[in-house]
Amino acid sequence: MRTEDLFRFISERYAVLQRRKQGLPKPWTQDPILQGYRFCNVYREDDTVTQWIKENWRDPNTNDPDVWFAMTVARYVNWPDTLAEIGYPVPWNAQHFAGVMLKRQNAGEKVWTGAYMIHAGKGGSKIAHIANNILTPLWERNASQDKIRPLADFTTSCAYFHKTLMEFNGIGSFMAGQIVCDTKFTRLLDCAQDWWEFAVEGPGSKRGLNRVMGRPVNQNWEKGEWFVGLTRLHAAIQPMIYLSGMPKLSAQDLQNCLCEFDKYERVRLGEGRPRSNYPGAK
């Protein structure tokens, strides 16, 4: 395994954040790829949008049994200015949600980010699709069938909560994983037995793990095989993280790092470029 290569990327990306926080002048790294392109933080909790969600919605409402629904709304929008205008979305008001989104859209303001690719249903708008076909049915099924709330109250498993979320229309594995990763920092899942080990793969982390494992970059993973590989890598890299003095790395954060490592390697090997440049040289 190329564990050392991955660790060097992780440690330097983390060091960039620490140098910036210390108020040091650019460049925060001598790595030209990290200077020139935008990469997510090593720890998801350090990302700008996650910080906003944490401070404004998640932590103030950590004891709310419906905070998981607010995390769902947060990730489908994923843009702080819009979320601030919507306000904490419990209880759910679809008309208010759509109204805020449409007003911002018509004013030419940014509505959401492109971090998670969500497409509208045939013949409809993305706003209407998310409000009417995903979020409203999710809220109504929770209220009428009590399908999520007791699970979130009493579950000890992030993986089980993830599986339950996927039973609802429009919530695929990757998005459900993002919702779980926010919810596990609330009282609903903060004692989950798989808090550190839970992870859900995405296309980038599949390619990234292929690179680390020395496999062809686009080779498919058999069912369950990717998670076994991630678990093996997690065990191998954790001592390096500990000895470096960095905070403990969860499996889901490691998954994110694999996605970013794939982007890094694409540039290094001349296979392509990330979509976002970064003025890190000066």
Image (cartoon, grey):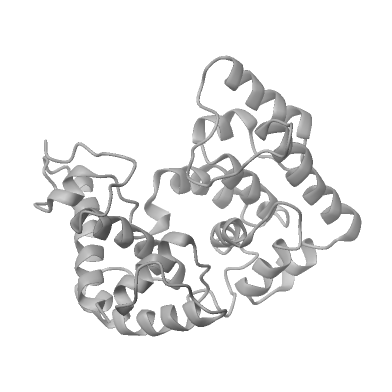
Res 248 visible = no
Q: Residue furthest right?
A: 144
Q: How many marks?
A: 0
Screen quadrant of the C terminus: top left
Res 140 visible = yes
- 19 to the left or right of 135: left
Where residue 47 appears, as percent x and y from the top left, is: 39, 49
State whether residue 274 is above or below residue 113. Answer: below
- 259 to the left or right of 242: right
Residue positioned 77% across, 40% down in the render: 92
Where residue 13 appears, as percent x and y from the top left, is: 23, 57
- 225 to the left or right of 22: right
Residue positioned 18% across, 50% down in the render: 33
Where residue 77 appears, as percent x and y from the top left, is: 58, 39
Q: Quadrant of residue 164?
A: bottom right
Q: Which is more toward the observer, 157 or 223? A: 223
- 277 to the left or right of 19: right
Residue positioned 61% across, 55% down in the render: 62
Residue positioned 31% across, 46% down in the render: 274
Q: Residue furthest left?
A: 30
